[in-house]
Image: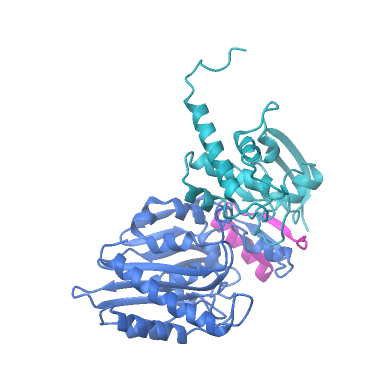
Chain colours: A blue, B cyan
Amino acid sequence: MIPGTYDYLVARSVDEAVALLDQHGGEAKILAGGQSLIPLMRFRIAGPSVLIDINHINSLEYIQEIDGTLHIGALTREAELDQSALIRERYPILLDTSTMVADPVVRNWATVGGNIAHADPANDHPATMLALGARVVARGPAGERVIPIDEFFTDAPFETALGSNEMLTEIRIPAPAERSGGAYFKLERKVGDYAIAGVAVYIILDGSGNVSYAGIGLTNVGQTPIKARAAEQSLLGKPLDDANIHAAADLAAAATQPTADTRGPVEYKRAMARTLTVRALHKALTRATGGE
Amino acid sequence: MSTHHISVTINGTPYQGDVESRTLLVHWIRDILGLTGTHIGCDTSACGACTILVDGKATKSCAMFAVQADGRQIMTVEGLEQGGKLHPLQEGFHEEHALQCGYCTPGMLMSSLALLQRNPNPSEHEIRVGISGNLCRCTGYVNIVKAIQYAAEKMQAAEQVPVGAEGGE
């Protein structure tokens, strides 16, 4: 199918992109990788009257760890995460996630920033960023602001805290602490399909093996990306034994609000969220204690 | 609606034209330029039949606007054959019977090419991951994997020929 008509503009810098967004108000959308937006425009589900192409802003493509924080430029392609030695060695949860996004051809253009800013509850990075306690940087005409990821997603699907004249420029993730581990598990019918359910987990253990931080994010089991707060809280100060893991998984499943569709009925999706939480917690524990 | 003048190099040949902003790259390549080797199999960028290389990266040409290709280097399936000689991947697909209806083949070939350029000696698993963005409804993939292995061996053997040992015509 053919998208509707629109005006195509190229921004050569972040300042230029923000100025164009400001000029066109809510009519304009940022075109990053386009791997979600262009199919949506083909179905006429999305119909922006202006697109601002940021693909030439090379300065938005980077993966750097500086002073205890991982900085990912918003235009960084998923394929760059897949192939990054830093990500492979230090952030296995991000490798778990990027390699589950769509398929390898899509990942050559799809961007980490786009995956988050699109705020599709079926996208994979939102759950992982919720688990990691990431922050995102938004740039607008008045300058930059840093938004905690759980405040970035709103209660409405496909909606974020970004103003119509703001764009996401960077994702910031705390560097892995001692005795920390994370994992992302996604159940999908086939490569490239949206998740039946997906679960991201990140934990930090204290010196005696008790949980001092737990982050749990859920993919495609509700109207928005879900942070399973009760499940997170239930683990604090406790060892990650089977009983605690299963109790947390029950709470994570209770936080889901799936709808029945071709990927399965509500009960199935909820059960899969529970199972994946158990698996992700086991994997995170293995990684936190020196395994792979 | 905006119209744009674009210049794109495809398989080494420069092309120019005016495109509507909404024209998809695959439609420009097929319908305007007449390079119909690239196929369109779906509307959702799921199937990979339209895969081409854009600046060396495997790309679903139905998920990119033609205007975005301005100034870029493109390779389509028509660029594989050189001087009447099939590319080792094409030869592999022929020898290993890696196609039945052939609809997915152009995209499959281009994804395979991108894979071998990045990883000249992939394992079977790496091949299966590498082509996982391309759907085939005929073969069950077994012979496609064999064809890519055939091409990988042949391309590596060709690279190992000592300088001066080939040619002489």
Q: Can you say whether B129 is above or below A205 in the image?
A: above
Residue A33 placement: quadrant: bottom right
**Residue A76 appears at what percent x and percent y?**
50, 55
Residue A132 placement: quadrant: bottom left
Residue A112 vs residue B129, the one in the foreground: B129
Looking at the rendering, in which quadrant would you find the C terminus of chain A? bottom left
Residue A63 vs residue A262, the one in the foreground: A262
**Residue sitting at x 47%, y 20%:** B162
- The answer to whether residue B167 of the structure is visible from this angle is yes
Left or right of A241? Residue B115 is right
Residue A202 placement: quadrant: bottom left
Left or right of B145? Residue B66 is right
- Quick check: is A8 in the magenta stretch? yes
- The answer to whether residue A133 of the structure is visible from this angle is no
Residue A4 vs residue A202, the one in the foreground: A202
Left or right of A281? Residue B77 is right
**Residue A248 appears at what percent x and percent y?**
37, 83
Left or right of B82? Residue A116 is left
Looking at the rendering, in which quadrant would you find the N terminus of chain A? bottom right
**Residue A143 appears at what percent x and percent y?**
49, 65
Range of residues picked out in magenta: A1-29
Q: Can you say whether B123 is above or below A183 in the image?
A: above
Residue extending furthest toward the top: B168
Q: Can you say whether B85 is above or below B112 in the image?
A: above
- Quick check: is A187 in the magenta stretch? no
**Residue A53 appears at what percent x and percent y?**
63, 56
